[in-house]
Image: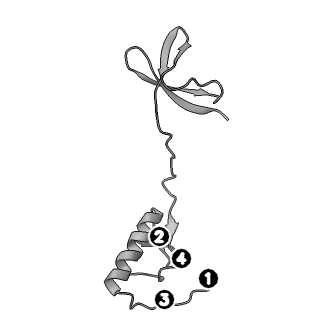
Amino acid sequence: MPGTYEFADARGKVVELVLEPSEAPRIGDPLVVDGRTLTRIASLPEVKKPKDFFHVAHSLHRWHPDAPRHTAEGKPVFCTKREIENFRAKDEARTQGKRQLAFDPS
């Protein structure tokens, strides 16, 4: 499966090439493409998350008053799982564990 690799030319301009992993040179090694010598540079792959992708906190109360938004059924919705963990920790600290969780079979 091809991957995207970053290279720098002699002027320092960064270009991306799609190559098979077996064809990609090691980092720092040159590659000649259309008469241009490109040097592979280190880069981290980016995972692009869709903007309409959210995490539903099934373990929190429905219609929780401090949640940023809710599903149509009232379940709290967050952008990341870390937000859920932080929200849960702050809520437990604020209530000092006194809030009773109701069983929600759905």
Q: Are marks 3 and 2 in contact (CB under 8 Å)?
A: no
Distance from disc 1 to disc 3, alpha carbons, whole Å, reads 14 Å
In the image, which disc is placed on residue 101? 3
Q: Is residue 66 visible?
A: no
Residue shown at 51% from the left, 79% from the top: 59
> For the residue marked with disc 4, what is the amino acid?
His
Establish if 17 lies above or below 51: above
In the image, which disc is placed on residue 77? 2
Query: Can you give x and y, in whole percent of width and height, for residue 76 in the image?
Result: 46, 74
Query: Can you give x and y, in whole percent of width and height, for residue 56 in the image?
Result: 52, 70
The residue tagged 4 is: 58
Answer few, some or many: residues within 10 Å of disc 3's Cα (few below 14, many 20 plus, some between 14 and 19). few
Dot 3 falls on a residue whose secondary structure is: loop
Answer few, some or many: residues within 10 Å of disc 2's Cα (few below 14, many 20 plus, some between 14 and 19). many
The first of marks 4 and 2 along the sequence is 4
Query: Can you give x and y, in whole percent of width and height, for residue 38 in the image?
Result: 49, 17
- Indicate the quadrant containing the C terminus: top left, top right, bottom left or bottom right: bottom right
Give the foreground label among 4 and 2: 4
> For the residue marked with disc 1, what is the amino acid?
Ser
Distance from disc 4 to disc 3, alpha carbons, whole Å, reads 11 Å
Query: Camera-side residue: 71 or 83?
Result: 83
Q: Are marks 2 and 1 in contact (CB under 8 Å)?
A: no
The first of marks 3 and 2 along the sequence is 2
> For the residue marked with disc 2, what is the amino acid?
Val
Distance from disc 4 to disc 1, alpha carbons, whole Å, reads 9 Å
Q: Are marks 4 and 1 in contact (CB under 8 Å)?
A: no
> For the residue marked with disc 3, what is the amino acid?
Leu
The first of marks 4 and 1 along the sequence is 4
The residue tagged 1 is: 106
